[in-house]
Structures are given as structure tokens and as C-alpha cells.
Amino acid sequence: MTLKVKFCGAAGTVTGSCYWVRFRDTQFLVDCGMFQGPKSVKELNYGDFPFNPAEIDFVLLTHAHTDHAGMLPKLTKYGFTGPIYTTSGSRDLLTYMLPDSAHIQEMEVSRLNRRNRQRGRDEVEPIYTGEDVEACLGQIRAVDYEDWCELDGVRARFWNAGHILGAASVELEVTHEEGRTERMLFSGDIGPDHKLFHPDPEAPSGLDYLFMESTYGGRERADLAPKERRALLAHEINEALKGGGALVIPAFAVERTQELLLDIAFLLKSGDIPCVPVFLDSPLAIRVTSVFADHACSLEDVDCSGSLFNHSSFHFTETVEESKSIARFKGNMIILAASGMCDAGRIRHHLKDHLWRPQSTVLLVGYQAEGTLGRLLEQGKKRVKIQGEEIEVRANIRTIDTYSGHADHNGLMEWVKERLPVRRNIFLCHGSAQSLEAMRAALVESGIPDDQLIVPQLDDDYTLEDGKEVPKLNRVIRRLDPAAVEKPDWHNDLAALTLDLRRQLEAVKSDQQRKELLARLKELLHEYQGE
């Protein structure tokens, strides 16, 4: 009996994690995540799944991040009725994260439809609604770490991945009709050793197949102790506040925000940074912070006193009115808001308010996917578009990666070595082309045969047959050209062109020259339309 695995996401990119596994008469998913990044990639969220949701028996969820769990309500919307197995920590986070995701989609679609009506375009629908989320949440079943789940000829076990609250690697055992058993491990996202809140990642060794994330392949970070990490944050905060303006921190609502709050509270109490207002402007992050407080006794490096994130300088702004009131504050302050890649949520309003101010600072504290506003700022772009408005970037853009929830290259290599031996194949996924190639090259250099390593592309579908050295790649219909998965698309190019065009037109000497230049551009467009 053959075993098949299709890479429906996180192949050649870091988002949209979703593996479709078929064994005997059972079909299930490991993760069902949302795509992020360029518009051509995000459009995959609106299209059909590459499988029939009504035929999926169950889902095994590694953790609650949107790029791993964000499409679960759509799965339910289109016919999935089975259980979703995950840890209690992930279940508690999803209780807040999925409704927030639906709310953001409904708001953004409402805004988009207003523009579409003005432009005479068709209206669109949100990927899912709050009603779909409610139905989906009722399908979640919490499981304990390291306890086997018996699932129709398939056994699953969750191991701590050290990434965020509730994050897990998923071990699978499948038993063939002749009694032969195969073992698989899906890494999920692996956290670094000695991470705040969590123990070091754990997982079994001696596998047949390993599905390995490669987010930070080829990228190394300094291994900082908590004291050093806080000293680095204090330096960034103090430098930012010297200018008399605001420090704006785009932060992921889950884990990154809580780590920053904990360290900022420590620095305020120790006097290492001045007492300035600290605004947490994210309803989701506020609710998630309460989940962390509820789980405080199961977290490392913190006490369970119930005052985990309390400080008199902290202001949690949950309502729209409270959020808008932040703009009335002048001078020094710290604003934390989601999302961490600056591609949705309230952070975009704060960036519109501060990117043009030379006295303000934006501090990026996490991975910025290709095509996101965060990546453009990280690359040093001097003009950006936010919600259709052109913004001149005069603020100081800074980056630190000591708060990353991902293991770096050395951490990933150490983790995979501890899983050896792997009898059959290691699939490298959840990474950019550069990080995937860096991981592959490093693993070959460490002694793993090149033909044992596979770097799948989006929608690749493999049959895993015992006795065959190389899994069979089945015929697939691709939803997107693999070359376009992790690159800026024409939407990004158009936004960059319009910004450059305005700047260059303003530099032209006369209105007559501007008119001539625009006329030549129109002629060129007409030539393409006539082809």
C-alpha cells in the first residue's frame, strides 16, 4: 500500500504550510495555513484547495500561526467536518486568532469593495467569516505532548517544538497491510535553544521520512543570553528616543509581542530605559497576552504571580477609538502593533503616521517575507505605498533578530542531526530558495547523500514507495509558477514604478516636458494593447 504526500504550501516559500497525506482510505492534512507575501501568492488563498475539503478525515496542526492555521475556517466552510488535533496551547490561541483573522478579512474586503465600486469592478468576498470560524473552533480537539493518537491505521504524536506557545512537531506512524510500519516527522517551525518561555525543542530520531523547515537556512544569529538580549533592546530604545519621537515596533501578536513586553517591563523597572508610554495597540495581541498569563505556570523563565505583563507605563488600546487616540500623543513613546510583516492590521496606520517623521524610528524584530511592506522597509526603500497613499520614508529603520522564534542555520543543523538516522528521505520546505539551497548544501557537507534530500516545489505530489530510492513525483497541475512563488510580482513592480515616476516627474524642469514624457508612456502602453 503506497503513501502519498502533496506539498500544498510552504514549498519554495515560508507561508501557506499544508501537507496533504493519503494512506489506504485515509486522507488528512498536516497544517492548513494562509499564504502571505506578494499579491499573486496571496491570491492562492481565494482559489480552490488542491483537494476536496469534504474528503479530508482529520487535520494535525503544528501550531497557531496564521501561515500554518489561517485557512482552517475555509476548510470547514467548504465541507470539512472532521476533528482538528492540536495542543491545548494552540487551541487557546486559535480561540482568539481565528476570529481576529476573519475580522481583518471582513474589514479589508469591505474597504476593497468600496474602491471596486468606485472603479466599476466586481466585488469580492472574504475568504471566510466569523460564522465559519465558530464552526471551525468546534472541531478542535486538544491533545497532550508525547501521547499517541490512534487515527484509523495512522498514529500521531506531538512533540514540543519550542517555537511558540503550543507549537509542536508531529510524528506519524503508518502501518501497511503486511505489518510493516513507517515513521514520519513533520518539524513544524523549530524554535531556538534557550528561548524565552519554552524548553529546548524535542523530537524522536530513527525515522523513515523527515519534513524539515528551513526558514533560517544559511542565516546565523548571535546566541545572546537574556541579559545581553535586553541590553541590545535597551540600546535600540534609547537611541530611538534620543530624537524625541516615537519608536514603532511591528510585532507578531503571538509570542514576539509577549517577549518584548516582558523585556520592556524589566528595562523600565531597572531604569535602563526612560519611563515613557508604551502602547500595545493590537486587540489580538492583548487577548493572546492573557492566554500567556493563564499558561504562566507552564512557561519557563517567568513567575506565575499573575503580574507577568503589568507595568504602570503599559497602555493596552483595544478599541478603535483608543487606537486613534495614540496619534494625539507627541514626543517619546513606544508603540507595538501587529502585524509583524506590516502587511495588515493597525501597524499600517501607525506607519502612515510616523514613517515620514525623521524623529521617529521603526524597529523590525522578525522575519520579513518577500513582497511585504516590512521587507520593503528592511531593504531601505525611500517611498512606499500604504492603503493607496504614497509615504516618504524619513524615519530611521532598524532591525534586530534576537527575538526570532525560529532556530537559525546552526540550530536547524543541530536539530536535524539529532533526528538521524533517516532511512529514506529528508524533504526541505518552509524556506526561500536561498535558505533551502543553504540547508541542502550544509546537509550534504555533513555527510547526508545528495539523493536523499528533496526540495519540493509548490503542488509537488510524491508517492513514497518502499524499495524505491527516489520517491515518485506524480503529475501535478500547478496553481502558480514555482518561479513566482518567492519573488516580487508585477503588483510590487507597479507600486515601485508609480512611486519612481512621480519622483522623477517632479524633478523634470517644466510642465511641458512632463506632458511630453507622459504622452510617450501612453504611446508605449497603446503599443502593447495593440499586440
Image: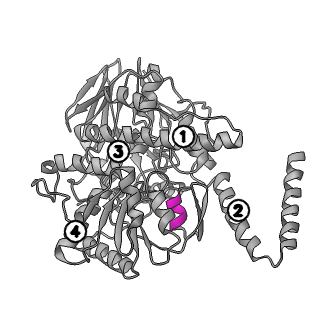
Q: Which labelled disc corresponds to residue 430? A: none
The residue labelled by disc 3 is 187
Label 3: how many Cα within 10 Å (few below 14, some 14–19, many 20+): many
Label 2: how many Cα within 10 Å (few below 14, some 14–19, many 20+): few
Occupied quadrant, residue 510: bottom right
The mark nearer the N terminus, 2 or 3, is 3
- The residue nearer to you, when weighing 427 against 371, is 371
Q: Nearer the viewer, mark 3 or mark 4?
A: 4
Taken as a whole, is the magenta stretch helix, strand or loop? Answer: helix
The mark nearer the N terminus, 3 or 1, is 1
Label 4: how many Cα within 10 Å (few below 14, some 14–19, many 20+): some
**What SS does tag 4 mark?**
helix
Relative to 67, say whether 478 is above or below: above
**What SS does tag 1 mark?**
helix
Query: How many marks can you see?
Result: 4
Q: Nearer the viewer, mark 1 or mark 2?
A: 1
The mark nearer the N terminus, 1 or 4, is 1
**The residue stretch that appears in magenta:** 373-378
- For the residues marked 3 and 4, what is the alpha-carbon distance in whole angstroms? 26 Å
